[in-house]
Image (cartoon, coloured by chain):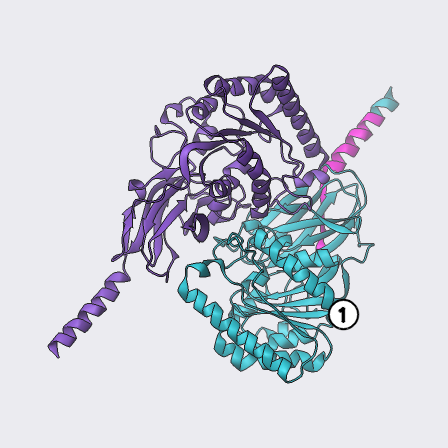
Chain colours: A purple, B cyan
Amino acid sequence: MKKHITLIALLLLSITVNSQIVYHDASVFPLLGKATQSTATRYERLPDSLRKISRPPLWELGQNSAGLAVRFRSNSTTIAAKWNLLLDRYMNHMTPTGTKGLDLYCLQDGKWVFVNSGRPNGKESTVTIISDMKPEEREYMLYLPLYDGVTSLAIGVDSLSEISQPKVDLPVRTKPIVFYGTSILQGCSASRPGMAHTNILSRWLNRETINLGFSGNGQLDLEIADVITNVDASMYILDFVANATVEQMKERADKFYTIIRSRHPDTPILFVEDPIFTHTRFDQRIAQEVKERNETINAFFQLLKKRGEKNIYFLSSRDMLGHDGEATVDGAHFTDLGFMRYAELLYPVIKKHMK
Amino acid sequence: MKKHITLIALLLLSITVNSQIVYHDASVFPLLGKATQSTATRYERLPDSLRKISRPPLWELGQNSAGLAVRFRSNSTTIAAKWNLLLDRYMNHMTPTGTKGLDLYCLQDGKWVFVNSGRPNGKESTVTIISDMKPEEREYMLYLPLYDGVTSLAIGVDSLSEISQPKVDLPVRTKPIVFYGTSILQGCSASRPGMAHTNILSRWLNRETINLGFSGNGQLDLEIADVITNVDASMYILDFVANATVEQMKERADKFYTIIRSRHPDTPILFVEDPIFTHTRFDQRIAQEVKERNETINAFFQLLKKRGEKNIYFLSSRDMLGHDGEATVDGAHFTDLGFMRYAELLYPVIKKHMK
């Protein structure tokens, strides 16, 4: 009888213990999506050396964790997360989950499958992302916020489960794909971090992608070309046209290109046209601006071709957003529908040309 | 000389005046999407007689303006809006634009085309939705917030332009389509009001739709069946399974159905299965719940067939969200990608069966 009581007590204890979530600092796990390791804090995108060099808004956007993801492995039945934000930013055309939430994917039969998002509660969040799973070993990827900074991150698992380094080297980390650009590139307005097109493409190609999108500030700042050249990439995708003025493109596009090309003579470089923003059907001023910017980038690309530049490619934006006018939240910023369409357009182009 | 100065002064005055926006109370324009006119205030969905009868959360959700839209016509170069919200609600898995913003569409060659959204600034917003248009006569539809109430709404146009009653009777208002259901039906998590699938389908079918989605509260409350029967509809779509428990369905589904059918013996009624929530690939508890709810609704539908009920249809949720697991923000609530896929699944079914 006493034995039975002890056994029952142990069982109950085990259930209680197992239902406790223990948090593990995520800094011990691989972090994907960084162009440089020389950042002041772990979850930033620009090297600390640019703090006093880059324009302040550009520097601050570098502190947003767009495109960063933590890889780990666990057999826990529950995955939770605790994270602290730099800003707790509010945006009226993004979900808080996209702006400052987390997004968990799991590798199944070689493909990354959406598990669930971590929906933020404020500057500090402690959230169960998924629960009631079978206790099986799984490989995970946890995407970080698109439009805020992360000052600390811990992953929670059942106290009796294990969390460990990934055993599968996917997505492939050698020769990542580097994207440079605008708010859209940074992921505005994906509903959750995994739906930024750079993250979608990373999953589809099973290759690390690096997101150097800087909302409103993809203005060909030359120090960013230096950051880009430090990555030994399979392809560079330059998608800045919505942010750069005609004057900025005329003054800096060639310098920006040449910085990259001089260090990477053979790496494919893809230029992307300005999206045909859906409200250009109505807003004549914006329609004219898009037209002028696209004439400028087309002329620049023709110039590069004429002078014999190799391994350069050009993507028309004609089919980028589909043709029903529905794929943006505000005429300009892509919803998940827009990002899916854009990823579908980019995928075969990257697949064909990447080294 | 004096004449010239007068002319220039008049021209300048004209430009100044024209650049001023004058606001017109929207209450003079047709309001689409209401099941009943007997509401306490204009932008509500449930009759005031239910205020003391319906469960409080259900009643309060009836004050959300999901699916309501104002129709008007104007030749203004700018369309602006001023609106006051009942709650100024915050949701971490929706954009504020979807929760409490506006969404403008324009009729072009018989099709409704997205113009732009009105992004909210707080409890009171004054926002330019679109500007720099050619001064042409256009037919507009302005969707109201999905998850908040509107206590007042005014539409702003250029002071020298005209705003008037619509001249085109689209979408068709006789025999609307009535949808009853859950948070998803109410539009969670569309990026902007126009992307709730009931609004997408209204545009594609050019037929008025009535949204009786009540977040978490599509629990077969019988007074809602009465509200539904008061609409002389072309089709009733009952999409409540994600909210109703197995017990609620067993107790009330037949009563709910019979209230509608007794008043509308020939009108097609479509039952919709619970969505296969994307996180059911991982969460065993939710997977089991969905399975049980769908077994219940399937059994109920078979019962109706066996007893000889006519004009009833059943929609499997197998293809509702696609098969890539990407179409929700949190496993359960549809993004624009999910709503587009759901609308594509529903469109041919409704088109085929609606009276």
Which amino acid, by three-letter code, is at mark 1? Lys
In the image, is A154 to the left or to the right of B130?
A: left
Q: Position of residue A254 (x, y in %)?
A: 56, 18
Q: Position of residue B155 (x, y in %)?
A: 70, 49
Provide the residue designation for mark 1.
B355
Q: What secondary structure is marked by label 1?
A: loop
Q: Report the front residue among A76 and B41.
A: A76
Per the rendered image, the range of residues in magenta is B7-26
Q: Left or right: A203 with respect to B261? A: left
Residue at image coords 40%, 23%? A52
Task: Give yes or no for residue B139 being in the magenta stretch.
Answer: no
Chain letter of the residue beneath label 1 in the structure image: B
* Residue A324 appearing in the image: yes
Residue B34's place in the image compared with A62, above or below, is below
Q: Nearer the viewer, residue B159 or B133?
A: B133
Is B115 rendered above or below residue B310? above
**Residue lying furthest left:** A2
Secondary structure that dominates the magenta span: helix
